[in-house]
Image: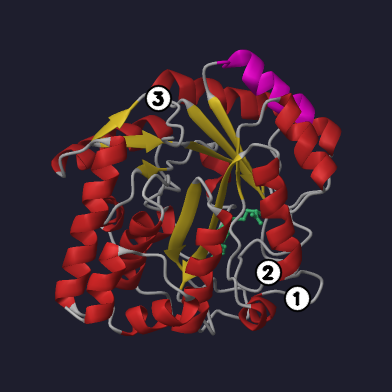
Amino acid sequence: MREIASRFLENPDFTKEEFEELLKGWENREERAAFREKAAFLREKYYGKKVFTRGLIEFTNYCKNNCYYCGIQRENRNVERYRLTKEEILECCREGYRLGFRTFVLQGGEDPWFTDDRMVDIISAIKEDHPDCALTLSIGEKSYESYKRFREAGADRYLLRHETADEEHYRNLHPSSMSLSRRKECLFALKELGYQTGAGFMVGSPGQTFACIGEDLVFLKELQPEMVGIGPFIPHHDTVFAKEKAGSVELTLYLLSVVRILLPKVLLPATTALGTMDTQGREKGLLSGANVVMPNLSPLRNRKQYELYDHKICTGEEAAESRSELGKRVEKIGMYLVEERGDAAI
Ligand code: SAH
């Protein structure tokens, strides 16, 4: 093991340059194994063998943005757009509750049809039906005031991946109407408002270097998010990145371990993108330090329409099926799914 790797295990508080140096040796087997072991140890210390589940409800694929990597970007004319009604969303939650989910995640494109008033109405209704559940939003960049209203209406958590903490890389992934500084401002606002906040990034997005990932890790350390979403980039055929290479599963697993070591109490999902790239991806993610899975609760008929990237898994099975299947898979690796809100350890 290199000196820098053992130093990271002792004190992970690295600078961007140190992370960059560390990452250069990520393929070293011994280092990877040591990081995985430490990550699993820390995960177990704070969360035991529990795997938390989040019922993901993809409630709209309309989006006003044009993130170059994303399949549901505004410019993609080949997407058949849909929105769930409030009643449909509530039905997804009821079904999820029956199946044992105690966190619901409302995710969507940035869809202006869902005004703050409409969101507040939906948030309040979900919290009224399920006061024992946590509600997570993942609906992009909003004003401080909007975030405040959603929080007051009962939203507990918010997922907003920063996507990349490197200015230039950010500009290569997004049109000029979007900015990294705005993204960061949103994340700090969410923290201030008391949301359990999730940041994160894709692994292997076009133009990403080890220096970019170094920035990401330093930013995560600064933000101190309660959740971090990390998954491989997967090209979507209707985007300008159609011909780009997908991110590496192995590097994603390595980074899950690194993030667990950096932020020991973090809630870390083994993402659907990881499961898409490798049939055992989610299990490998859990073994590398993750402790959350996010099965799909969206109505079957809409699943394929929420296509952020090609070949996304779990677009064809019932939520019930997928929860029990996942339960079995998780038990095979010595962990178990729980029926809990699964808040961040304090
Ligand atoms: N509109 C919301 C939700 C975005 S979808 C928001 O802006 O936060 C959730 C995440 O999917 C994104 O943050 C992005 O990191 C990821 N994603 C989008 N396109 C992807 C792709 N082609 N491959 C892998 N992940 C992708």
Left/right placement of residue 78 relative to residue 19 reads right
Q: Which residues are magenta?
A: 120-131
- Closer to the camera in the image, 177 or 320: 177
Identified at 43% across, 76% down, the residue is: 246
Nearer-the-camera pick, 221 or 118: 221
What x and y, as percent, mark residue 67?
A: 68, 69
User: Is ligand 1 less than 8 Å from the beta carbon at label 1?
Assistant: no
Element under disc 1: loop
Q: Mark 1: give few (<14), some (14-19) or many (20+) Cα within 10 Å.
A: few
Q: Is mark 2 within 8 Å of ligand 1?
A: yes
Task: Name the main secondary structure of what is drawn in magenta.
Answer: helix
Q: What's the mark number on residue 175?
A: 1
- On-image quarter of the C terminus: top left
Q: Which mark is residue 142?
A: none
Callout 2 touching callout 1 (CB < 8 Å):
yes
Residue 122 on the magenta span: yes
Q: CA distance from mark 3 to mark 1?
A: 39 Å
| Residue type marked 1 | Pro
**Residue at (33% x, 57% y) in the render:** 261
Question: Which element carries disc 2, helix, strand or loop?
Answer: loop
**For discs 3 and 1, the disc positioned in front in the rendered view:** 3
**Which amino acid lies under the numbered mark 2 shown in the image of this protein?**
Cys
305 in relation to 137, above or below: below
Residue labelled with disc 3: 340
Q: Categorize mark 3 by other alpha carbons within 10 Å: few (<14), some (14-19), many (20+).
A: some
Q: Which residue is mark 2?
A: 67
Residue 345 belongs to magenta span: no
User: Would you say residue 108 is visible in this rendering?
Assistant: yes
- Residue at 53% x, 46% y: name it: 303
